Amino acid sequence: MSNYSISTSLNDPATAEILQRELYYPFGMALRGTAPLVPEIEQEFLYNNKELVGETGLYAYGFRYYDPAIGRFTGVDPISDQFAWVSPFNYAENMPIIGIDLHGLQLFVIHGTREDKPSFSQAAISEFLRISGNTYVDDEFKWDAPQFNGQSRRKHASENLARYIYQSRIELLEKGIITEDEPVTILGYSHGGNLGIQTTRIFGNLERKLNLITVSTPAFNTNWKDAYGYGGNIEDPMFSEGINDHIHIVHEDDNVARVARTFSGHRKYNNPDTRNIIITDEDVPINFGLGITPHTELPSHPDFPTFLKGVAPLKPAPAPNFPKPSEINNEN
């Protein structure tokens, strides 16, 4: 691994000059004995673009310091309960070649119909963390989701979710787990995805943007705007100003998506900014049975995390600069 700082001539690229070069072992310790270049302009943001702190040999990673000589942080990860399978001092889950350690971004996972907890496997959640760029998982939000729940019920729940996201963020800021410039992603399963879309509209009305992942969510599309620029369906992402990037994932044999078409629902979104990803039965084979359908089994299916490894990450979202709880309501 290496890090180069170069000076480039716009008139003649051939005259580009290397001003600083650093070579590393995988965990970030400086590799010596390789005829290092003596820098003319020394800068301290080196391994993974983190600041090397003075003569300590430690890198500043937000709220912890990292020692590349031992490949460990000097303090306990304040969100270590989210990653019980590794040491709270670990760096990048001991895989520095393929991963880097971020610092406390938030992924809110929203359950679907007739659930009180999301049904994604831990392996799937790990892949969603990679896709979202987040490291902190919050799956504690609960909403009233009977088998038949309409948009008005989800509208009320979206206001509660927006307030929940805000309150959670305040608590994490006070504990020093996250910083104010860190973005938020909503991961919604089934009608939890519809709820997530309505929640992004709330933040869009307040000129804030979130990232969104919907899984097995019935897609509602509209093809018109009213005089104020709003679409006819409040769960159409095309008309949410609060979405920075959106990935929609659904199995080709999803029975709920099929039924939803009867009620103006679809499998895919028409929104040109939505990345629709259709999973085939070859990708994730699911046999229908008593209470077993592609809709119910996809989140916990053992082949689902493997499929997710091929999904490219979301675009980085801007810091939301969240509103006060009194500002949050869903009027559109």
Image (cartoon, helix red, strand yellow):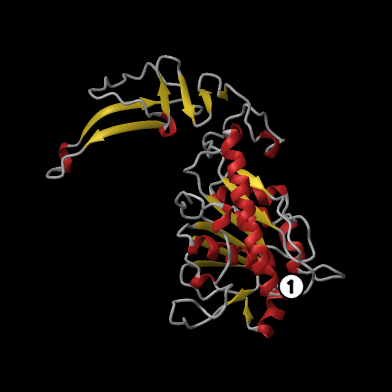
Q: Nearer the viewer, residue 98 or 104?
A: 104
User: Which residue is labeled 1 in the image?
Assistant: 149
Q: Quadrant of residue 145?
A: bottom right
Residue 218 screen position, x and y as percent: 65, 73
Q: Residue at position x 61%, y 29% from top?
A: 90
The residue type indicated by label 1 comes to Asn
The part of the image, by quadrant, that contains residue 198 is bottom right
Which residue sits at x=79%, y=69%? 146
Residue farthest toward the top in the current orientation of the protein: 55
Task: List the single residue furthest toward the front.
Answer: 326
Q: Is residue 319 above or below residue 284?
A: above
Q: Nearer the viewer, residue 24 or 141?
A: 141
Residue 187 in view (yes/no): yes
Considering only vertical position in the picture, is 33 above or below 19? Answer: above
Tell me the quarter of the image containing the C terminus.
bottom right
Residue 28, how many percent across, how many down?
47, 26
